[in-house]
Amino acid sequence: MIERDVVLAGKHGLHARPAAEFVKLAGRFDSDVQLSKGDMTVDGKSIMGVMMLAAECGSTVTLRVKGPDEAAAAEALSAFLSSERPEE
C-alpha cells in the first residue's frame, strides 16, 4: 500500500468538477483508492465520498492506494491533487 499526504493546489479544492475528474482518473486503475481528510476516510472512486470531504484549496488530504497498479495510480492521483488546474 502506498500512502501520501498531498496539499490541494486547485483554487477551488475538490468541488464537484475536480472531484468528478479525480473519481474518473481513479477509476482507470484496478487498485483500491482511499482519501482521508481529518477523521474522515472515503472511497476515492465514489463522487459522493470525495465531495463529502469538503476539501478546500490548501488543505492536506491523505491518499492511500492498494493494488496491482498502486505505484502508477498513486503517482497520477497525487499529481492531479497537487496541480493548480488553471481551467477551473
Image (tube, rainbow, N blue to C red):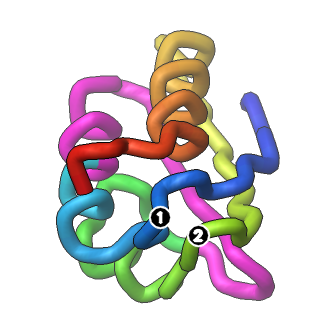
Residue 71 lies left or right of residue 15; in this view the side is right
Q: Position of residue 65 (x, y in %)?
A: 60, 36
Which residue position is annotated with label 1? 11
Q: Quadrant of residue 45?
A: bottom left
Q: Position of residue 62 (x, y in %)?
A: 73, 56
Q: Which mark is residue 57?
A: 2
Give the camera-side residue of 44 and 54: 54
Query: On screen, 70 above or below 35?
Result: above
Give the camera-side residue of 50 and 6: 6
Q: Position of residue 86 (x, y in %)?
A: 33, 44
SS class of the residue under badge 1?
loop
Residue at image coords 77%, 86%: 39
Q: Quadrant of the N terminus?
A: top right
Q: Position of residue 17 (x, y in %)?
A: 19, 64
Q: Quadrant of residue 40?
A: bottom right
28 inside magenta stretch? yes
Q: Amino acid at mark 1?
A: Lys
Give the camera-side residue of 60 and 4: 60
Marks 2/1: CA–CA distance: 5 Å
Residue 59 lies left or right of residue 78; in this view the side is right
Magenta-tinted stretch = 22-41
Q: Residues within 10 Å of mark 2 (few under 14, many from 20)?
A: some
Q: Residues within 10 Å of mark 1 (few under 14, many from 20)?
A: some
Residue at image coords 33%, 25%: 29
SS class of the residue under badge 2?
loop
Contact between labelled residues 1 and 2, with CB atoms less than 8 Å apart: yes
Residue at image coords 47%, 69%: 13
Q: Amino acid at mark 2?
A: Cys
